[in-house]
Amino acid sequence: MFAASAFDPVNRALLMFGGQGFYETHASALCLDMTTMTWTTATLSGDSLPAMTEATAVWASDRKGFILFGGAGYYTTHQDAWFVQPTSACTLTVTQLTSAGSSPGALLGTAMAYVPSESAAYLVGGQGYYNLSDQTSTLVP
């Protein structure tokens, strides 16, 4: 539960990143191939994703990939962002993004929308380790 999910319209696949089980967080990605309606564990290459829950994901249509942000592990919150590029329906290359400006901070449960004409994702709200956020931040991959 609490996995970040987004739909890949190019490969017709629903991806779920991370999530939480009984006393553990997951670093895997699950893939629902919408053509065959079968679930598999996605094959990941490139940078490693941390075990996370309550991250947020969005499809970046002009970049044909996902932006994944934030989330939490046990006793920690993440301020990292990743670009996840599908090479097929359930095969993904992960690249951790580096910050060229100020970070919105470590947040979980943010809302995120992608605006293709600006090649930017907008993050709204979320929760830090001890506080709620009322900020709106821009993430340009």
Image (cartoon, grey):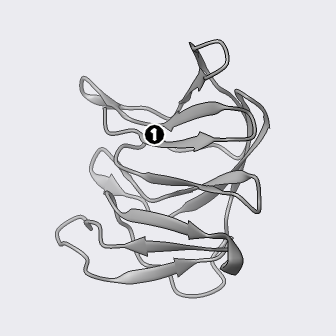
Q: Is residue 101 left or right of residue 20?
A: right
- Against 102, residue 111 (above or below) is above
Residue at horizontal 44 percent and vertical 59 percent from the top = 70
The foreground one among 5 and 11 is 11
Residue 133 located left or right of residue 4: left
Query: Residue 67 placed where, x, y %?
Result: 60, 57
Residue at left 76%, top 63%? 62
Residue type indicated by callout 1: Ala
The percent coordinates of residue 69 (x first, y second) are 50, 59
Residue 92 location, x and y as percent? Answer: 73, 37
Horizontal arrangement in the rendering, residue 136 relative to residue 34 (left or right): left
Report which quarter residue 40 is drawn in.
top right
Residue at 45 percent across and 37 percent down: it is 18
**Image quadrant in which you'd find residue 49:** top right
Identity of the residue furthest to the right in this view: 87
Closer to us: 32 or 17: 32
Closest to the observer: 51 or 54? 54
The quadrant of the picture occupied by the C terminus is bottom right
| Residue 10 visible in this rendered orientation of the protein | yes
Residue, disc 1: 51
Secondary structure category for the residue under label 1? loop
50 relative to 97, above or below: above
